[in-house]
Amino acid sequence: MAIEAPYSKYRRQNCVIIALILVILSGWCAYDGYMNDKWIEEHTNEDGGPQPYLTFNRQCPFYAIPAAVLVMGFWFVVRNKKIIGDENELIISENEKIPYDSIEKIDKTHFDSKGYFTITYKDSQGTEVDKTISYKAYDGLKGLLEHIVEKIS
């Protein structure tokens, strides 16, 4: 039976919220910077040059919209990300799989207090690698940790 720990719901929701805030901010700034004649008049110098607020509002959409697209791109990448503990190995990603027989130790000292544990294992070249897995990045780690401990004991 495979145990799954999906990517943190909190982080996925934050991506959507941040992208939404960026889109709203860019719309507001675009309105004030290009369409709100009274606001534009208030933030224009006597010589006709824009004040810093007007300049910011005119430039903001050109940075905020691409930032929102990048944040949603990150959300798209991590929305189905998860760690899977199956019968033979711990699958962190398609490229990173840790066989249970290569795991040397699990440091779960800080799991109850700080929410992370560290797996020490030997990679294919024979070097020791430490992999820290945190509850901030993944949900359901308690069941996964119990499964890993059961498999290596």
Image: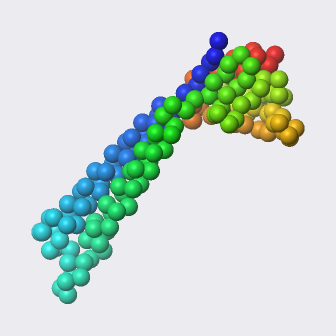
Residue at 47% x, 31% y: name it. Answer: 9
Residue at 20% x, 87% y: name it. Answer: 47
Residue at 32% x, 67% y: name it. Answer: 59
Quarter of the C terminus within the rendering: top right
Q: Is residue 105 left or right of residue 20?
A: right
Count numbered badges in the picture. Answer: 0
Q: Is residue 13 left or right of residue 33?
A: right
Q: Quadrant of residue 97?
A: top right
Residue 98 x/y as whole percent: 75, 29
Residue 31 x/y as whole percent: 20, 60
Residue 110 seen by the camera: no
Residue 129 seen by the camera: yes
Residue 4 x/y as whole percent: 59, 22
Q: Is 125 or 138 nearer to us in this picture?
A: 125
Residue lying farthest left? 38
Q: Quadrant of residue 64?
A: bottom left
Residue lying farthest right? 126
Q: Quadrant of residue 84?
A: top right
Residue 105 x/y as whole percent: 82, 28
Residue lying farthest front? 94
